[in-house]
Amino acid sequence: MTSIDLRSDTVTAPTPEMREAMNRAEVGDDVYGEDPTINRLQEMAAARLGKEAGLFVPSGTMGNLAAILAHCQRGDEVIVGNKAHTFLYEAGGISALGGVHSCQLPNQPDGTLRLDDINAAIRPDDPHDPISRLVALENTHNRCGGVALTVEYTRQVGELAHEQGLLLHLDGARLFNAAVTLGVPASELAAPADSVTFCLSKGLCAPVGSVICGSRDFIRRVHRIRKMLGGGMRQAGVLAAAGIVALETMVDRLADDHRRARMLAAGLAALPGLVLDPGTPRTNMIFLSLSAEVPLDGETFAERLQSRGVRVGVTDVRRFRLVTHYWIDDDAVTRTVSAFHETLISA
């Protein structure tokens, strides 16, 4: 029986259409700017997000790092949430490699940073202080339950940042999930941002890659930084081809992932011993915990689930994250609920 992998939407394998496109891809040396498939992907991505230009990079982490280093000088400060992916899960790259200081503000349960907190964090023009240069947001927000930040909120942050002479970067790893759940074009969510990254290799199901989008001048700076970071690839059109198929075919169907996440959450909520986070799922992520009467910790529970063919992410001692994606169908939802039920009654 096929294993059901709900640990993340990063586990998605490319679709048959993507594999065929990769096989047929026309390629060239991208370091020379001569890979036509990469060039097409970059143009498509920029157009989707309403920006002038785009740059294909191997990962979202490199995308965020390159974007922040293009905006900031050594000793500058970026204002970021204390639950942001850039702060928690990117190995401190902005500081280690770029000398960029971070000011961490508390993320609210809806993934936002309070406007008053952002305003108060902006440094005065004082030689004792780092220079406040950039605000960074995340949409959807992973650690806050996969919640989508609205167009209006992002616009408010952009206006505040720009009025104070700062720039706005948007970590849009799952931006298209946000666009689909909010019913708005991704370009509207990206419009207030001076730069935005999004991942092709999560819900969009491509095997590798992210795209950074912004102004042409910004992308020229990012291109140099990508080279410094070792991200200059050669005949990588074989990868970009899958990204083109992702943009053409995988965006609208993200609604299916959200629907299945709701189905899964409803099934799990009916099982004694499980406590779902209020409001989960917001998009394609479900967060839940074991109640006090379950005599297992999270790791042991997850191991027993895996023996029944279901893999989940353990995020705390008794807490889990489940993420739906292209390879999770209705039958997988039913089987997952059954595996949780069997594990609970055998505990």
Image (cartoon, grey):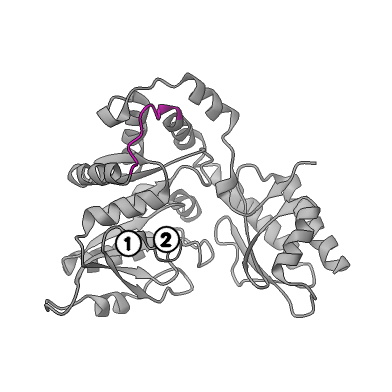
199 lies above or below 234: below
Asked if the residue under mark 1 is in contact with the one under mark 2, i.e. CB atoms within 8 Å, the reply is yes
x, y (%) of residue 280? 60, 65
Q: Residue at x 38, y 26 (%)?
A: 235
197 lies above or below 32: below
Q: Furthest-right residue in view?
A: 346
* Magenta-highlighted residues: 230-238
Is residue 217 found left or right of 307 in the rendered image? left
Mark 2 and mark 1 lie on one chain; the one further toward the N terminus is: 2
Give the structural element (helix, strand or loop) at label 1: helix
Give residue 343's quadrant in the image: bottom right
x, y (%) of residue 157? 29, 66
Q: Give whichever of 150, 244 is nearer the camera.
A: 244
Is residue 27 found left or right of 71 in the rendered image? right
Give residue 39's quadrant in the image: top left
Give the CA distance from mark 2 to mark 1: 8 Å
Q: Is residue 345 visible?
A: yes
